[in-house]
Image: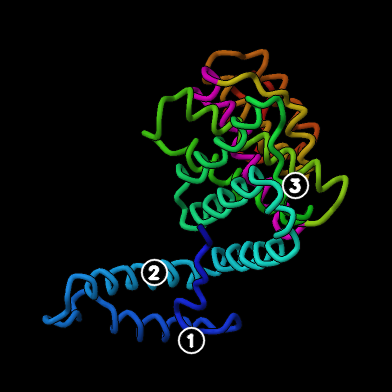
């Protein structure tokens, strides 16, 4: 199964502008919309028109969104390049050929924000290799930069599923949050050794900030392993942001009556930001004097 070529479906070029994309969608949608089907159309003609209309809507759904279009373009270009380079290799290795087909399904699912489907495919690939005593690695299919991009999309899917209420048991949601954290941390580590994707490194740090602070919520603290504060330091955030995170953690410790821990973390915050704003109430609770 191939990733659909949305540009061909909308009958436009790769360099089409946003207005050209919208204009092409409207033109084709009018032609194939179910309400426009001719009364004398046979079953096959009706089925074809409905299928074509779904394709047109899916294509427009991705190409009209700047971020998803960028992700799609990168993946499409990479797949086209890899197919040309490795076609003979995959012919000799049926297992890799099957993995490559599943990767195409994986990316299509993630592009359409079908996170459950995408993660299910990803975990199938990983689990099958584990049974054979090997580790599935996305670098076997893409170059270094594209592999890191793909990991970002997978981590994003895990994060969205983990923080989605009602999506599985609490333990399963926390498993997904932990996996998202691990992948994001791996991306940060890779960036430190071989910089290649600074365009979204800030976004990775923002997401890790949310996950780290979630460990210090009532739900996260009960369900997840205790987070070492050194992880926050590895983010190398501005002192003001790190101090703010320490203050939030101190407030959580107060909430669950761990006052010594709260006092220790709050003092760490003041070491970084002596004039830490919004800490007056917690300082009074911990008898640390006053602050702004």
| Residue drawn at 50 percent across, 66 percent down | 4
The kind of secondary structure element at disc 3 is: helix
The kind of secondary structure element at disc 2 is: helix
Q: Is residue 202 magenta?
A: yes
Query: Disc 3 marks which residue?
Result: 139
10 or 253: which is nearer to us? 10
Colour basis = rainbow
Residue 95 visible in the snapshot: yes
Give the magenta part as a residue range.
197-223
Count of marks placed on residues: 3
Residue 77 figure quarter: bottom right
Q: Position of residue 208 (x, y in %)?
A: 65, 40
| Residue drawn at 52 percent across, 20 percent down | 255
**Residue sitting at the far right:** 193
Distance (Cα) linking label 1 and label 3: 36 Å
Label 3 crowding class (10 Å Cα cut-off): few <14, some 14-19, many 20+?
few
Counting residues from the start of the chain, the first of labels 1 and 2 encountered is 1
The kind of secondary structure element at disc 1 is: helix
Left or right relative to 245: residue 177: left
Q: Position of residue 201 (x, y in %)?
A: 73, 52
| Residue drawn at 43 percent across, 81 percent down | 22
- Mark on residue 55? 2
Instruction: Give the foreground label among 1 and 2.
Output: 2
Query: Disc 1 marks which residue?
Result: 20
Distance (Cα) linking label 1 and label 2: 17 Å
| Residue drawn at 39 percent across, 80 percent down | 25
Q: Does the magenta stretch include residue 168?
A: no
Q: Where is residue 182 in the image (x, y as percent from the top left)?
A: 68, 34
Q: Where is residue 260 in the image (x, y as percent from the top left)?
A: 67, 13
């Amino acid at each position: 199964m191939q990733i659909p070529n949305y540009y061909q479906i909308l009958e436009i070029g790769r360099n089409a502008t946003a207005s050209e994309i919208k204009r092409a969608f409207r033109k084709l949608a009018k032609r194939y919309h179910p309400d426009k089907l001719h009364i004398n159309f046979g079953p096959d003609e009706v089925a074809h028109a409905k299928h074509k209309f779904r394709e047109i809507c899916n294509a427009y759904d991705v190409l009209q969104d700047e971020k998803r279009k960028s992700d799609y373009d990168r993946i499409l270009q990479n797949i086209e390049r890899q197919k040309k380079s490795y076609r003979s290799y995959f012919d000799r290795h049926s297992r890799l050929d099957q993995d490559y087909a599943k990767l195409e399904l994986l990316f299509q699912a993630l592009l359409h924000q079908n996170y459950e489907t995408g993660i299910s495919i990803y975990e199938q690939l990983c689990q099958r290799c584990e049974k054979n005593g090997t580790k599935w690695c996305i670098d076997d299919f893409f170059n270094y930069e594209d592999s890191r991009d793909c990991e970002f999309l997978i981590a994003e899917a895990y994060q969205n599923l983990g923080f989605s209420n009602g999506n599985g048991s609490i333990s399963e949601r926390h498993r997904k949050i932990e996996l998202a954290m691990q992948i994001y941390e791996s991306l940060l580590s890779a960036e430190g050794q071989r910089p290649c994707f600074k365009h979204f490194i800030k976004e990775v740090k923002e997401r890790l900030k949310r996950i780290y602070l979630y460990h210090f919520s009532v739900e996260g603290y009960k369900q997840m392993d205790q987070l070492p504060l050194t992880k926050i330091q590895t983010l190398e955030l501005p002192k003001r942001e790190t101090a703010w995170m320490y203050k939030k953690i101190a407030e959580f410790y107060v909430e669950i009556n761990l006052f010594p821990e709260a006092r220790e973390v709050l003092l760490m915050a003041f070491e970084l930001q002596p004039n830490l704003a919004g800490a007056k109430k917690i300082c009074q609770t911990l008898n640390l004097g006053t602050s702004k």
